[in-house]
Image: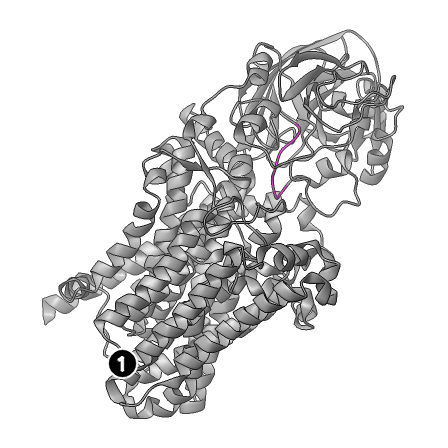
Amino acid sequence: MNEKLATRSWDIAAWRSELRGGSLWPLLTLLLLPFGLFWAETLGLRVFYHHDLQYYFFPYHKLVVDITQSGHLPLWNPYAFSGIPLLGDGQTAMFYPPNWLFWLLSPIHALTVVVLLHFSIAGGGMWLYLRRLRLSRLAAFVAALAFMFNGFLVARVVHLSIMAGAALIPLIFWSIELLLQQRTRRAFVLAAAMVCVQALAGHPQVPIYTAVGLGLYILTLAILHWRRERHWRAFTPLVYLAGVYVVGYALAAIQLVPWIEFASFSPRAASASYGFVTFQSLVKFDWLLFLFPYGYGGLRTTWLQSAPAWDLPVYMWERLAYVGILPLALAIVGIADLKRRRAAQDQRGDASRLQAERLLALIVVLVVLVLIAAGSSTPFGRLVYLLPAIGKLRAYARAIAVACFAITALAAFGVERLKQHSATARRLDCAPVVAALLLMLVVDGMLIAANTVGAPGFASAASNDMFKVMLDRSLQLDQANAYVPLLLSIASVLVLWWLSRGVNRVNSAALVAIVAVDLLGFAASFNPTIAPDSFARVPGSVAFLRRDPKLFRTASFITNDRLTPAIAQEQLAISWALPYGVEDINGFNSLQPRRYTDVLFGPEIEDVSYGFLRDTALLQPDHHLLSMLNVKYVLVPRPSDLEIRPRHSDRISNGEEPSNTGWRTVFQDQHVYVLQNPAPLDRAYFVSSVNTIGDAATILAVIKQPGFNPGQQALVEGALPEQQAQRLSTDGPAQVQVERVSPNELRLHTQATTDRFLVLSEMWFPGWHAEIDGQALPIYRTNYLLRGLVVPAGEHTIRMYYRPTSALVGAGITALAMAGCGLALTGMRRRRAKTIEYA
């Protein structure tokens, strides 16, 4: 890897040369293509909205914009889970550069434009990487088309942070490849910056899998170099890679350090079971999604997806990795070309050796990442589970993102084989035709099996609903889900046969056209859209809640997340309380607090609640947890199958009014009931009984008992001396008024005749500070998840504010890393200046 390759320097002159040679026009086409394909979305006439987009990414990004535009730092989110960190919620990704568009456009329009931008980033990055390997423009363009609209990216439109991380994979490989070839400070800083940007994109899993892929890539190249040179320096690129990641993650520390702190308080901080982390793995018929992208149906009915939309889209999102049938055949051709390239590399010079070595490295990356994605379906999954960090990541199937990158890169090598064979041989190249015929036979075989024996003919399919959907519905020949892949496989055989006889402009155009029709048609029809006006309305339920001037919280009893925005808004479903500024105990967040989960769902629950709340026993007259959390209003879907049993065992369903459980109906419309708590606790209140208990599990057990009265009792975890707790157990006159100054600050005005213990219905979390009359005041973890204060007698003003140390530490690390990178680049420029001066 240390050869002096005939490479252009990474400078302005090189780009001008590329432009004069016509190489940048395909790149510009790739960058602009998504905005032309989705022209209505680009102009804001339609917007993406499905599932996580409306339940997470729109609410959280809008919240960040709203808080900053009001003149406050986006540190704390008081509108979900009784309060959680906002800066520490990595998926808000407020330091990720593309997300800065949220400050320039309306939030829902910005969300859609950022999605489209990542298609451009994916295609442009793949083009740059493959051109760096000296592959032809045709090869790079075909592979870029296949990657930028592959099934993983298209399906992950609903999960922007995962999509963003996956879209950046080619740029990461390009920057590392640049570093391998140039070994300059500028290349090192660029690679570190790319790693930083991916880390800031908002989800840790794809960056980790990218690091695994890069490690395998460079390790393979190092071994090949060592076999050739027999020198330890062959392994120095591994040191470079480690340095790139250290500096890259240091640059991203301003977001990563608070994120790590927040994650340590979530259910996913615990060591998850093997069954939990591998539940979403590619198994059995899942692999057919490489040939039948709508094998499990789709999110909507279109000309490509003629079967009814399937009601379990998450199963498809975690597994879809379609790269197009023709690119898949080309990838097989590229793999088959390895032996020829390895044999010819010494005769054809350094560029040929570079390509042959990268081809092998990509094959290694593909094999290992596919094995990871297979999860529990192979013994390799058990080995992965034993690894630190990577083994405890949920949904191993997501490793297929890096595999998609490898497959499409290998497809470029397949195109390159066709071009090279056309230039050097007169006979027909059989490998491409054989590869396409092989895929067509698999497509034909599965269609024959599905239309003759169906799911009952396969033991593993007969007991799996998803496999039944594929075999008995989607792959029936009267469905576009079946006959479109069949037609594409036939077209792929024909065009590869044509190309194998010699590559020319006409059949090259046919190659690009088939890939474009296949993948652009798939991408344009997959995700549903809606008019943006749906996100600008204020529903009646919110208008009613806004008329209450006091501080309070709501709770939405949600059992269904397949809702249109209009219905979800009325019900404040999942995270819809955030954009309306309604403080809620519900929410959707992958870092949902562990203790919140324990209180409302149970300590045995491994995962987050995804915004669902079903236990109507919380509304029983002898249950006080909702009152403890300052819940004044409960929203219940209408109609609903939820049961409220306290007095009359009536049901809320089909328009029937909820029974009188003490919670009375104060608002209703077509989609929701709003019930009012008959005896809600205020946001802050003095208690007459204070006990210190060192064991958190004991406190949890006590507060969940029906007889526990949070308005009178405070169970303080550990730090408060027992004697002081006894002195504070009094019911003398005391008053408190609470004012929310900003999302990050509360102001309390207290008046008491003696020292009292004050409980705040606010989530305890490190980084919160309290001052009384300008002096620091300790905050105690109370009633398992809330905050408590010892308030002295008299009249006082207490200021409570959120200033997380983790944010300061992260900012400091980022500043030092930026300074180091700046010094490295400045030093390089000074050396250049001296070289010019004395030349």
Looking at the picture, which amino acid does disc 1 mark? Answer: Gly
The residue at the point 58 percent across, 32 percent down is 575
- Magenta part of the protein: which range? 585-591
Q: Which residue is mark 1?
A: 502
Quick check: 652 above or below 252? above
- Dominant SS in magenta: loop
From the viewer's perspective, tell me whether residue 629 is left or right of residue 426: right
**Magenta-drawn stretch contains 590:** yes
Image coordinates of residue 340 in percent, x first then y, are 38, 89
Image coordinates of residue 462 in percent, x first then y, are 74, 60
- Viewport quadrant of the C terminus: bottom left
Image coordinates of residue 569 in percent, x first then y, are 56, 25
- Tell which of 597 and 53 is nearer to you: 53
- Tell which of 564 and 429 is nearer to you: 429
Residue 250 shows in this picture: no
The residue at the point 43 percent across, 23 percent down is 70
Judged from the image, the secondary structure of the residue bearing numbered disc 1 is: loop
Image coordinates of residue 184 in percent, x first then y, are 30, 68
Residue 49 shows in this picture: yes
- Viewport quadrant of the N terminus: bottom left
